[in-house]
Amino acid sequence: MRTIVNQPEVFLRQKGIKASFQRVRIFDYLQNSREHPSVSKIFEDLHPHIPSLSRATVYNTINLFLEKHLVIPVPVEGTEARYDLSEPIHAHFFCTGCGQIFDIDTKAFPLPAELKDFDVTETHVLFKGQCPQCVGKTSS
């Protein structure tokens, strides 16, 4: 379901973002991650490879990406904010058993009739429950 940007530097510049080395690496990390990482996770994973990276730089970059609509927050209660790329548009499923977040294709969900005359620019859908592995653990 993911679209991979082969030239993140060019992509970021097209979105009006200065493509610094650290911003490019953070964007590349996000597009290759399936974890829907928090700022702490991004920092912990990238800092060993980019010793000059600070937690503040990661926060500021995520905030810039939010402002430019490149990422969306995944609203998982009780944990540090988690993030995902906004394209392609998709929903999420949060497993309350193991804490994993799964991407859900939203092409099967038509726009509600009440919104037919609206210009919808952003959608956040979060399903919660248990993934198949956690369901199997509780039923045995």
Image (tube, helix red, strand yellow):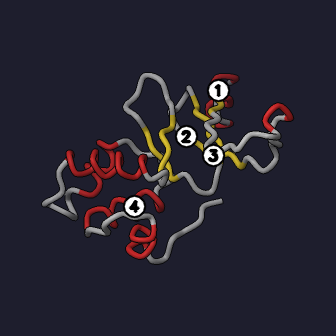
x and y, in percent, of residue 11 in the image: 45, 71
Q: Which mark is residue 129?
A: 1
User: Residue at coordinates 47% horizontally, 62% vertically from top-left?
Assistant: 32
x and y, in percent, of residue 19 in the image: 32, 69
Mark 2 touching mark 4, by CB under 8 A?
no
For marks 2 and 4, give the CA distance: 19 Å
Disc 3 secondary structure class: loop
Q: Which mark is residue 81?
A: none
For marks 4 and 3, give the CA distance: 21 Å
Q: Amino acid at mark 3?
A: Thr
Q: Nearer the viewer, mark 4 or mark 3?
A: 3
For marks 4 and 1, give the CA distance: 29 Å
Q: Nearer the viewer, mark 2 or mark 3?
A: 3
Mark 2 touching mark 3, by CB under 8 A?
no
* Residue that carries the numbered disc 3 in the rendered image: 121
Mark 4 touching mark 3, by CB under 8 A?
no
Q: Amino acid at mark 2?
A: Ile
Which comes before the other along the chain, label 4 or label 3?
A: 4
Q: Amino acid at mark 4?
A: Phe
* Residue that carries the numbered disc 4 in the rendered image: 27
